[in-house]
Image: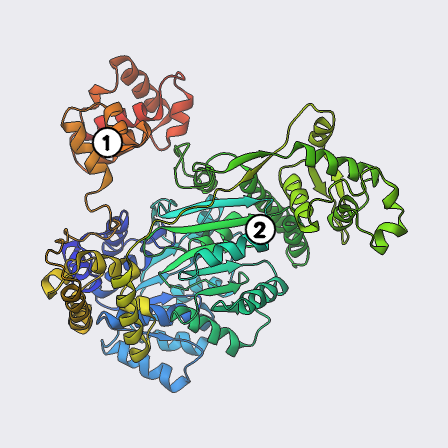
Amino acid sequence: MLENALKILQNYYGYQTFRAGQEKIIRSILEGSDTFTIMPTGGGKSICYQIPALLLKGVTLVISPLISLMKDQVDSLNNMGLPATYINSSLDYQEVKLRLRKAKNGEFKLIYVAPERLESGRFCELLKFLDISLLAVDEAHCVSQWGHDFRPSYRSISSLIKKLPARPIVAAFTATATAEVKEDVIKLLSLRNPNVYISGFNRENLFFSVVRGENKNDFMMNYVQENKDRSGIIYAATRKEVDRLYKILQEKGYSAGRYHAGLSDEERKKSQEAFIYDDLNIMVATNAFGMGIDKSNVRYVVHYNLPKNMEAYYQEAGRAGRDGEPSECILLFEPKDIMIQKFLIEQTSLSPERKINEYKKLQAMVDYCHTQSCLRKFILEYFGEDDVPDECNNCSSCNDDSELVDITIEAQKIFSCIVRMKEGYGSSLIAQVLKGSKSKKVTEQGFQMLSTYGIMDEYTLKEIKDIINVLIADNYLYLTEGQYPVIKLRKKAVHVLKNKEKVFQRVRKKKEKIPQDDTLFEMLKRLRKDISDREGVPPYIIFHDSTLREMSEYCPTDKEALLKLKGVGEAKLNRYGDAFIDLIKKYVEEKGINRVKKPAMKVSNKSKDDKIPSHVITYNMYHQGKSLQEIAEEREIKISTVQDHLIRCSNEGLFVNFDDFITKEQESLILDAIEKIGAQKLKPIKEALPEEVDYFTIKAVLCKHKSET
């Protein structure tokens, strides 16, 4: 059956192989086992239930939380020539009955349904006439009150399963779930001895960064200007903030939309569709926007305010780069954001126990904003991953190229002024005193008589406030809570005043963009948009950006060559192939391009610059007799990365002689530890061994003995 699954993947989805983890999940479902999967956004969850749905004898019912998500998924499946439909509140009862009748007659293999539908006894009665072989639950974390998007209607799924004449296979999927939420999902969906697959939370194509202490408006406007041709989402914590940012972007002439619960249904729908169809580049939104948005070419997600917890942040940030192309996730942090989130928690009707849990999660988010360590490591460990490398080389902590500027004198002036103002005022008035303002507020308090009055008159008020924000973000100052917060000194600031410590501000270097000829890529995007408008489907349903990138790189001028590109299946080749080939042919002739690169065999999970998997390149060099150090130096990667590559190759069945790297004594110690502790997790094994025995040695022993059994 798995052979047939692979044929569907190749012929319809346009990929030669499954991504990491997909094959096991599909096999589990096809073998009739309940299955629970945690796979990051953009990891290919939908394929894991769509392909089994096409192979199982009956109908698959997909529980999906949003109308927009259902329509996206169904449009995408129909576009590939696969039979699917949806049932939601936009349809009348007669249309619902018609679609269910067609499903019973075999015209549809997948039916997408909102969880609220399951609360209707009338609808559930209709479902009894269908042969439902698989029930797939998307965004399964919504069933748990400890999840970040709890939806009470998800609790109806378990009762539906009991009402059906024959119990279907149940498969649940989510992108983010802590151990607590995982247990809750399994229990509340009544999964029977499920196979649990956690494919890893790492999204290697995403660059994570935290920006502290900078002027948010300035940063955002500079960033948007530098990325004006790219699609992005800007999240803000409140409707008021969304409206303000939207207005600024509109006034500056940017193609922006907005989305929050305070807008009418019609305005939200119009804005969302314009973004999905590439008519808008920027969406400014609260967290009400995004679940189920399958737009693949979002190149950046900026959080203008601190999110409420890591689960929400990672899901929202994960809406960038769903096509696997490099994308950015930026969090702009200032301490007053913490107060906003605390206020929002207090306004909820949650139980005291759940509020305590929300405060705990918020603190983890604050810790993320202040960590000096690898941001990716922080995220992955939060979600329970063990043995995460100390550096990822793809976040602002690992790739910190900012310059340190000494601002000790400025800090001392600010601290002195705050002390002389009795630590009783906010940043605006402090800045006015330092600037030497003659405002009424300053003179009424007699602050013009202070020795610190006007000692920073060479700075603008905005510049002074920006420095104050840096000092707050770096824990020299803090804001009190309440409606009118005031600024007070921390102990660190006292050391600075006594000349025992210096203060440095990180100043970002301006990145120079490498010129790139995107002429053909932009032409292909315009063609895709024309087809999108004509057919009434979002552009990414026709082809992802990553597919267009490959077209612009390899310039395929016949159907055979086009079919070799990832994301081009038989149905799309027949439907769109001629139009794209004609455009490429014309471009090649006009530019006088004589020799076109030949595409490599397509794969589903490699970038366009990495046709041979990185770990296989390392493996080949190892078999040429090169040492780990030599491989690391030649490839400009870390030795730990080389070690990880060899472990991965071994797990994929390639021979690695681990005796090259482990001594008999180490092997004996590790095997003894495994016998006592078990091999489920590496961390307990590591803690039971001498400090010099590293994780690579443990994994090498495990791989060696796995291959021998």
Q: Is residue 430 above or below residue 253?
A: above
Which quadrant of the view contains residue 455? top right
Q: Give the colouring mode of the picture.
A: rainbow
Residue pictured at 45% horizontal, 71% vertical: 272
Query: Considering the numbered disc 1 on the image, is that residue within a helix, a strand or a loop?
Result: helix
Label 1: how many Cα within 10 Å (few below 14, some 14–19, many 20+): many
Which quadrant of the view contains residue 114? bottom left
Viewer-side residue, 88 vs 561 = 561
Residue pictured at 74% horizontal, 36% vertical: 413
Contact between marks 2 and 1 (CB within 8 A): the answer is no
Q: Amino acid at mark 1?
A: Leu
Query: Considering the numbered disc 2 on the image, is that residue within a helix, a strand or a loop?
Result: loop
Q: Amino acid at mark 2?
A: Leu
The extreme bottom residue here reads: 94
Residue pictured at 31% horizontal, 72% vertical: 529
Task: Look at the image and tell me in which quarter the N terminus lies.
Answer: bottom left
* Location of mark 2 (residue): 306
What percent of the width, then of the height, locates residue 653?
17, 36
What percent of the width, then of the height, locates residue 626?
18, 24
Label annotation for residue 578 = none
Q: Mark 1 or mark 2, which is nearer the start of the sequence? A: 2
Viewer-side residue, 67 vs 55 = 67
3D distance between C-alphas at marks 2 and 1? 39 Å
Q: Is residue 164 visible?
A: yes
Label annotation for residue 646 = 1
What percent of the width, then of the height, locates residue 667?
27, 18
The extreme front residue here reads: 458
